[in-house]
Image (spheres, helix red, strand yellow):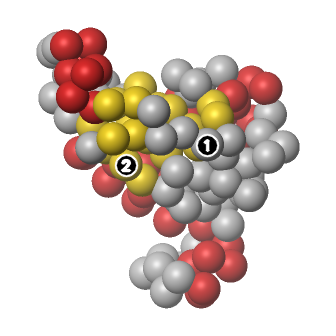
Amino acid sequence: MENLAAIQPALAGRSRVWFCGDTHFGHANVIKYANRPFASVDEMDAAMIARWNARVAPGDVVYHLGDVSFHRAPRTLEILQALKGQINLILGNHDKKLDPACRKRFGWVKDMHTIKV
């Protein structure tokens, strides 16, 4: 179990800790299923990257709770490299075959992780 209070000294100079999940970059059907306000995958991806980077600073820690992307590895890696922050990934059901090159973008990748807030 990770205690956020215990890692605060390690976060010195970092402004925030973020939690997100189910970004589903590249997933056309999620636009319909989740009633996302986008006309296309390209529009959705661009908007999510812009909104992420408008909030997350380079030194922030992000815990992504799974289902990152439906794109193939090259595009997924391009998106991950565009996102600010130290990103840690707890695998979702759509992340099980995440390409090794994409895995390297994350601080760590785990099947499960407990964080005490």
Indicate which disc residue 21 carries.
none
Q: Quadrant of residue 100?
A: top right
Identify which residue is drawn at 16% across, 29% down: 15
Q: Quadrant of residue 42?
A: bottom right
Identify which residue is drawn at 49% across, 86% down: 35
Indicate which disc residue 112 carries.
1
Q: Give amino acid for label 2.
A: Phe
Quadrant of the drawing holding the N terminus: top left
Identify which residue is drawn at 58% across, 25% down: 108
Kindly state the secondary structure of the residue where label 1 is placed.
Answer: loop
Labels 2 and 1 touching (C-beta < 8 A): no
Residue 65 vs 108, above or below: the answer is below
Indicate which disc residue 19 carries.
2
Q: Give amino acid for label 1.
A: Met
Where's residue 97, x and y in %? 84, 43
On screen, residue 45 versus residue 37, left or right, reads right
Question: Which of the marked residues, 2 or 1, is nearer the chain's N terminus?
Answer: 2
Q: Residues within 10 Å of mark 2 (few under 14, many from 20)?
A: few
Q: Nearer the viewer, mark 2 or mark 1?
A: 1
